[in-house]
Amino acid sequence: MILTDKRILEEMDKGTIKIEPYTRGDLGSNSYDVHLGSTLATYVNAELDAKKHNKIEYFEIPDEGFVLQPHAFYLGVTLEYTETHAHVPFLEGKSSTGRLGIDIHATAGKGDVGFCGNWTLEISCKQPVRIYKGMPIGQLIYFPVDGEIEIKYNQKGNAKYSGQPNKPVESMMWKNTF
């Protein structure tokens, strides 16, 4: 099951879903549209190593927009800060974004119960495309959970992405033991 607009509003009233900034016009019948924040990042090195901390460089999207290039990988961020305390949030691309050839996540579309922060986007494109800060970039859908949560994500000591800021966050794979 996916939460409907009325159920999302009810959960927001209860405090189990938080979206800031929130605009009523961005609430669909069963999703909430999120927007591209003003900061993008790229990895410093062309070759990445899963066992090492790969550094990123940040840059601001200018008012005239920024042209994404194919075969390049960008980290973006949602304008919206979200909290989800009783549901599983999924971030999906909007069809309008997809029809421009933009992918907003490689594999990380699912959040965890207890995720609090801005969403880091894993952006790639099929052909050059100009993007703008504040443009609709994706949509959040919410699934109820079945059963009691033992430890929410924001309460785990090893939660690598809890409290993500309003700028992209690089991979923290290097913090894993393997």
Image: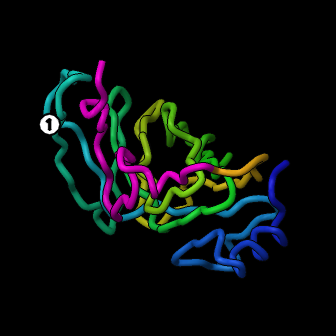
Q: Which colour scheme is used?
A: rainbow
Per the rendered image, the range of residues in magenta is 150-178
> Looking at the rendering, which quadrant does residue 39 occupy?
bottom left
User: Is the residue 111 above or below the residue 13 in the image?
Assistant: above
Residue at screen point 42% across, 40% down? 122
Tell me which residue sits at (48%, 30%) in the image.
126
Position above or below: 135 against 22:
above
Q: From the viewer's perspective, is 8 left or right of 70?
A: right
Q: In which quarter of the image is residue 71?
A: top left
Q: Residues within 10 Å of mark 1 (few under 14, many from 20)?
A: few
The three-letter code of the residue at mark 1 reads Val
Residue 144 in percent (x, y) is at 77, 53
Residue behind mark 1: 44
Give me the residue at 42% from left, 60% from top. Answer: 132
Q: Nearer the viewer, residue 97 or 167?
A: 167
When the figure is inspected, residue 59 is found, relative to residue 106, above or below; the finding is: below
Q: In the image, is residue 174 above or below residue 163?
A: above
For residue 104, say whether it is visible: yes
Q: Is residue 53 left or right of residue 103?
A: left
Q: Quadrant of the C terminus?
A: top left
Q: Position of residue 107 (x, y in %)?
A: 51, 31
- Percent coordinates x, y for residue 171 in the rendering: 31, 37
Q: Any magenta on residue 147?
A: no
Element type at marker 1?
loop
Q: Find out whether residue 172 is within the magenta segment.
A: yes
Could one spot residue 96 in this view of the protein?
A: no
* Viewer-side residue, 83 vs 79: 83
Q: Main secondary structure of the magenta part?
A: loop
Q: Which residue is drawn at 75% across and 68% down?
A: 8
Q: Is residue 48 left or right of residue 68?
A: left
